[in-house]
């Protein structure tokens, strides 16, 4: 993989991570779901373009979320690495359709939300209420279900543009 391709994928992931970690005035479920939505991007890129997303980009995106949102340093990096590990472990050998990608995202978002809850509970040394993370995971799953077809359509259109052959008229 070239450094430019890794830089584009990593830069895009970093931009999304910083945007979702900003202090938006939104309901609690949305505020919990925003950093978790980076997991959807990690999963989508891991399944649609294996090897395109470098490991360092996933870690840096998590650290950026931690710094911008004042979370314990390393918390979201570990959550993103958990999502990447689950996503790679369950990635099918051949392309799957919309329903396959959506069902494949369920264990990824559940494990990421569970990791975030466990790490936050361990950091605070008290069992936190899990219902907020469950609502955030459900919200991110619904968001993935809506945005996945759009990402697929954009990917297909980009592939068609790359296949164009320009010829000089005679």
Image: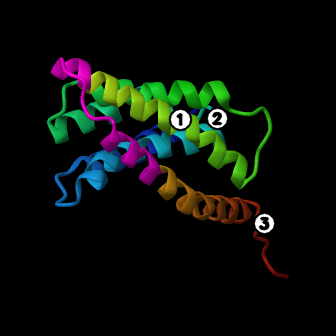
SS for callout 2: loop
Q: Residues within 10 Å of mark 3 (few under 14, many from 20)?
A: few
Provide the residue designation for mark 2: 50
Percent across and percent down for residue 109 are 49, 39
Pointer 1 or 3: first along the chain: 1
Mark 2–mark 3 distance (CA, rounded to whole Å):
27 Å
User: Which quarter of the picture shows residue 68?
Assistant: top left
Percent across and percent down for residue 160 are 73, 64
41 left or right of 124? Answer: right
Provide the residue designation for mark 3: 165
Q: Residues within 10 Å of mark 2 (few under 14, many from 20)?
A: few
Residue sticking out furthest to the bottom:
170
Q: Nearer the viewer, residue 3 or 146?
A: 146
Residue sticking out furthest to the right:
170
137 left or right of 53? Answer: left
Percent across and percent down for residue 106 are 57, 41
Mark 1–mark 3 distance (CA, rounded to whole Å):
39 Å
> Up-down: is 65 above or below 30?
above
């Amino acid at each position: 993989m070239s450094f430019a391709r890794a830089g584009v994928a990593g830069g895009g992931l970093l931009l999304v991570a910083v945007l979702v970690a900003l202090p938006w005035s939104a309901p609690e479920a949305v505020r919990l779901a925003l950093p978790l939505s980076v997991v959807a991007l990690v999963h989508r890129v891991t399944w649609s373009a294996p090897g395109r997303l470098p490991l360092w980009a996933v870690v840096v995106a998590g650290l950026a979320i931690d710094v911008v949102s004042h979370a314990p340093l390393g918390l979201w990096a570990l959550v993103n690495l958990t999502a990447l590990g689950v996503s790679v472990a369950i990635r099918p050998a051949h392309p799957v359709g919309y329903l396959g990608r959506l069902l494949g995202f369920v264990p990824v978002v559940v494990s990421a939300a569970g990791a975030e809850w466990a790490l936050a509970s361990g950091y605070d040394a008290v069992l936190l209420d899990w219902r907020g993370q469950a609502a955030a995971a459900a919200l991110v799953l619904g968001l993935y279900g809506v945005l996945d077809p759009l990402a697929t359509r954009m990917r297909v259109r980009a592939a068609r543009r790359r296949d164009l052959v320009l010829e000089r008229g005679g």
